[in-house]
């Protein structure tokens, strides 16, 4: 494991709110880390502290071996070591939720803002490069209010990226957009972030966004980090019920689209075939994440050939875990699948490990997240 | 209108413009400090600067006369160090008009700066801008209409100032007499017709300044 490029360990309290703790947030390499959690969980605060726009009460932030922030909240005597690097010297690219484009500057003026101090030639060519890269050609002399939401989002990204930041911070990058645009741009944004290959932190409360953009996932709840790990792992194996409740989807498996027909997609997942509603899956998408919530999985021991769900999967029980009133059942049906039952239901079915049974899932309850490129 | 009248109008306008330009940098800087920074004594300074709005203008004039008179602390220093005499000269006119107009400029500029979305200033900082660059590339351009409206208001106020001016600059025709002071003199001397002419000119200039200011602040919304 490489040493982390970003290491943050700090806390901040707002009056009336919970204490926000980035209780050792570490990012290594050039991937996309998603800070995920419900609103009020403190993810935006953490992002703003990283950018230097908020000052933590105490803790440290360091990036690439350089201290960005250091403050001990304990004793006054130690305050001689306190250090805050102002945002202008951090070299981050920050894209806030509402994009905050300068309303009095054109698209080109916005993108060039961070290039202050470079030669006019260099600025011009860099702006042109950004316009080309983000498909904004021809819009360079427009003002922000003359742009669509999706275009504004791209200009904000271009402005942040133009000065070649060492760390990119995106706050709910797609939340300000209407639903169709959001769905379209999700895949596009992932592609752009992949091309950039700089360490990136994305804040979101949208699990589809987390899934399609993130490599690593950090789940936050009430100001604390409750779980972290590769995005698929965290979604498929929530550490506890709190996390399960937040991520709200237990099974996430890579799948391949075999056929798209009449709005339905036939998929190969592990050794099993599934039918799902294609929804907004773009034509030509082949690689997807298949998401199934545990409570959407129906278990039955009887032959259910007459049952309505499209997907009837022969399954073997691998593990049974009690979690309060609920029992979580890990199944193997050609791919790992998680189901959740009440304890009572589990007792009535007399489920044991290695039992065979049928897992039923309705086609509309399988969510597909494109995962190309 | 006689040649003297034109001289009077020109002098008054020059004094009002000079005093407004004089307080502009200071007033905008103070407005920024009030809108964007927290510092000890902020409320006191804010109240102090606004005092001329509610004090009788002659009181403000009296204070200035004491401060800038030959024996006053500031007047004495200016005379000894720079050989500068202020009271009962055109400089006293500019001083009185500036002090009286400052609160209007500061209030308008402060509101205009407060209306600038701080998120825009923050973004500019993340893009490597110094505080000074943030101010003149983001805050100032976005607040400029409001500030300009404040400038016009201050100018109109300066043009109509009477009480403080007569205390600290007196009424020396051709040297310190401004439009309002001349109107007062005319009425004292029984020349009502001339007073009305000057009053009409004052009204037209004030109306134009306010109308322009109103128009500009409207367009912002």
Image (cartoon, coloured by chain):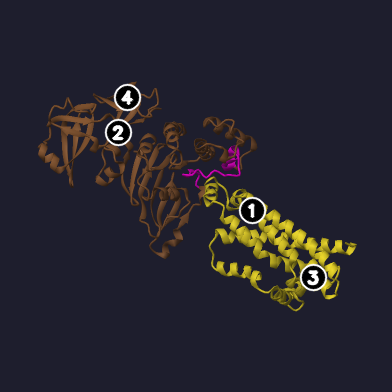
Chain colours: A brown, B yellow
Labelled disc at residue B181: 3
Residues flagged by tags 1 and 4 on a common chain: no
Q: Contact (CB < 8 A) between labels 3 and 2?
A: no
* Distance of label 3 from label 4 (alpha carbons): 88 Å
Give me the C-alpha separation between circle 2 and circle 4.
Answer: 15 Å
Dot 1: within a 10 Å radius of its alpha carbon, few (fewer than 14), some, or many (20 or more) residues?
Answer: some
Query: What residue does disc 2 label?
Result: A291
Q: Position of residue A93 (x, y in %)?
A: 49, 42
Q: Which residue is at a point 64% across and 37% down the rendered structure image?
A: A120
Placement of A11 over or under A371, stated as above or below: below
**Disc 3 from disc 2: Cα separation:** 83 Å
Callout 3: helix, strand or loop? helix
Mark 2: few/some/many CA within 10 Å (<14, 14-19, 20+): many
Tag 2 subunit: A
Task: Please say if B27 is above or below A126.
Answer: below
Chain letter belonging to callout 4: A
**In the image, residue A102 lies in the stretch drawn in magenta:** yes
**Mark 2–mark 1 distance (CA, rounded to whole Å):** 53 Å
Magenta residues (range): A90-115
- Disc with the residue nearer the chain's start (2 vs 4): 4
Q: Are marks 3 and 1 on the same chain?
A: yes
- For label 1, the residue is B217
């Amino acid at each position: 494991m490489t040493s982390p490029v970003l290491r943050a360990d700090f806390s901040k309290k707002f009056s009336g709110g919970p204490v926000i703790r980035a209780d050792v947030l570490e990012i290594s390499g050039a991937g996309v880390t998603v800070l995920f959690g419900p609103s009020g969980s403190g993810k935006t605060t953490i992002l703003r502290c990283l950018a230097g726009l908020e000052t933590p009460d105490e803790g440290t932030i360091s990036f690439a071996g350089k201290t960005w922030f250091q403050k001990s909240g304990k004793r006054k005597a130690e305050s001689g070591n306190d250090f805050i690097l102002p945002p202008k010297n951090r070299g981050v690219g920050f894209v806030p939720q509402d994009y905050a484009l300068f309303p009095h500057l054109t698209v080109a003026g916005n993108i060039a803002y961070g290039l202050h101090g470079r030669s006019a030639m260099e600025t011009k060519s860099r702006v042109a490069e950004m316009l080309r890269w983000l498909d904004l050609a021809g819009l360079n002399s427009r003002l922000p209010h003359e742009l669509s939401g999706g275009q504004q989002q791209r200009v904000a990204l271009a402005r942040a990226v133009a000065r070649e930041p060492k760390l990119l911070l995106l706050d709910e990058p797609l939340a300000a957009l209407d639903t169709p645009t959001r769905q379209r741009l999700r895949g596009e944004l992932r592609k752009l972030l992949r091309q950039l290959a700089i360490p990136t932190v994305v804040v979101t409360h949208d699990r589809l966004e987390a899934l399609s953009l993130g490599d690593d996932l950090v789940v936050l709840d009430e100001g604390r980090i409750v779980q972290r790990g590769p995005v698929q792992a965290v979604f498929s194996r929530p550490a506890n019920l709190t996390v399960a409740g937040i991520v709200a989807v237990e099974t996430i498996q890579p799948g391949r689209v075999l056929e798209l027909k009449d709005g339905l997609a036939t998929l190969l997942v592990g050794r099993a075939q599934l039918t799902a509603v294609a929804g907004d899956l773009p034509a030509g998408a082949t690689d997807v994440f298949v998401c199934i919530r545990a409570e959407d999985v129906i278990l039955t021991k009887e032959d259910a050939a007459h049952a309505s769900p499209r997907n009837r999967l022969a399954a073997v029980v691998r593990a049974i875990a009690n979690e309060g009133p609920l029992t979580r059942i890990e199944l193997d049906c050609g791919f790992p699948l998680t189901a959740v039952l009440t304890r009572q239901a589990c007792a009535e079915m007399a489920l044991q490990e290695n039992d065979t049974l049928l897992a039923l899932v309705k086609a509309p309850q399988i969510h597909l997240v494109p995962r190309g490129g | 209108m006689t040649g003297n009248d034109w001289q009077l109008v020109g002098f008054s306008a020059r004094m009002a413009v000079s005093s407004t330009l004089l307080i502009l940098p200071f007033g905008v800087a103070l407005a920024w400090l009030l809108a964007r920074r927290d510092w000890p004594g902020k409320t006191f300074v804010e109240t102090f600067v606004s005092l001329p709005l509610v004090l009788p203008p002659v009181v403000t004039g009296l204070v200035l006369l004491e401060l800038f008179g030959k024996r006053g602390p500031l007047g004495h220093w200016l005379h000894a160090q720079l050989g500068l005499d202020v009271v009962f000269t055109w400089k006293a006119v500019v001083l009185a008009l500036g002090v009286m107009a400052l609160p209007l400029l500061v209030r308008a500029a402060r509101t205009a700066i407060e209306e600038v979305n701080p998120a825009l200033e923050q973004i500019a900082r993340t893009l490597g801008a110094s505080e000074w660059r943030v101010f003149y590339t983001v805050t100032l351009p976005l607040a400029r209409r409001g500030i300009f409206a404040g400038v016009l208001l201050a100018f109109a106020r300066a043009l109509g100032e009477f009480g403080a001016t007569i205390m600290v600059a007196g009424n020396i025709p051709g040297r310190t007499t401004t439009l309002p002071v001349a109107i007062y003199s005319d009425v004292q001397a029984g020349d009502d017709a001339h007073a009305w002419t000057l009053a009409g000119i004052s009204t037209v200039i004030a109306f134009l300044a306010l109308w322009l200011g109103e128009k500009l602040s409207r367009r912002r919304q």
